[in-house]
Amino acid sequence: MAIKTSRNLMMIAGSFYIPKENENKPFGEDAHFFCPSAQVIGIADGVGGWSRYGVDSGEYARELMRNAEYDVKNYRSIDVGPKQVLRQAYSDTAAAGSSTACIISIAGNLLLAANVGDSGFMVIRAGKTFYRSPVQQYRFNFPYQLQKSSRANGAEQAAELTVEVEGGDIVVAGTDGLFDNLFVDEIETIVNDYCSGNSKLSLSEILATAALGKSLDKTTVSPFEVAAYEAGKRRSGGKYDDITVVVAHVVECSCMQ
């Protein structure tokens, strides 16, 4: 019997999470997972506005990601469809609150994603940004979100994204705690410094820590401040928030058939 070898790509991923300091919400409002066997990343950011009603949206985000991870681990198809996963996880989630969400998978040389809101990802190739997922928001600081409501659009509002990737690409995924505080060129610089150095820390931890530093600095210029200015609002410095970062290195693998 002849053995055919095909060249495919896979993600090797790591993550780092820094929740906001809040004794009432020790786990913060972000949630994420990476399933190596299914090659799927998931990130979610519970919408903090629910706290005024006594609701912890972190519960919604965590349940949504638990359901998504369960679905991908039990998926029968070789290629996981991110929107289908998000649709099923949304249907299975019963907690109160709402959340942004991003599901990312890889199939062959294609990065597939379903994204709702202002969580998202970027692909860095040869040190420069090759792709950045678009933000979905109704207006400044009001992102699209998943919510159990008869008026909600649910997972159908998710943008379906396809990006052709190659070995050596670096995928940086995160919640708005990352992208509201670090500009694209700052992320590029950190990634390039990491790749040319010998840091004992993970790239995801370095990025998350850098985002935290800017979030606490009211004298710095941040993407959040720029977006606020463009919306006619005044905000100074970074935005203190939960920060989730998942970094995936795209590598070639030989699959025996």
Image: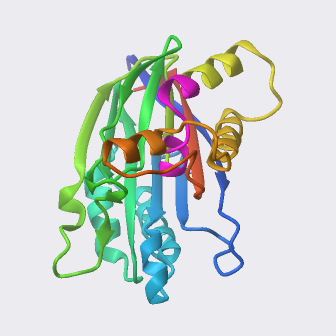
Q: Position of residue 151 (x, y in %)?
A: 16, 78
Residue at 27 percent of width and 33 percent of height = 162
* Residue 76 sits in quarter: bottom left
Q: Nearer the viewer, residue 180 or 200?
A: 180
Task: Note whether 65 is above or below 190 in the view shown.
Answer: below
Q: What is the x, y in percent for residue 153? A: 18, 67
Q: Please tell me whether the stretch drawn in magenta is mainly helix, strand or loop.
A: helix
Point 47% across, 75% down: residue: 57
Which image quarter holds the C terminus? top left
User: Can residue 39 be seen here?
Assistant: no
- Residue 91 horizontal side relative to residue 204, left or right: left
Left or right of 166, for residue 21: right
Describe the colour scheme in one phrase.
Answer: rainbow
Give the position of the N terminus as an image quadrant: top left
Q: Is 51 drawn above or below residue 115 in the view shown?
A: below
State which region is magenta.
Answer: 175-187
- Magenta stretch holds residue 75: no
For residue 236, above or below residue 127: below
Instruction: Reply yes or no: does residue 183 show up in magenta.
Output: yes
Measuring from the top left, give residue 206's x and y in whole percent.
71, 36
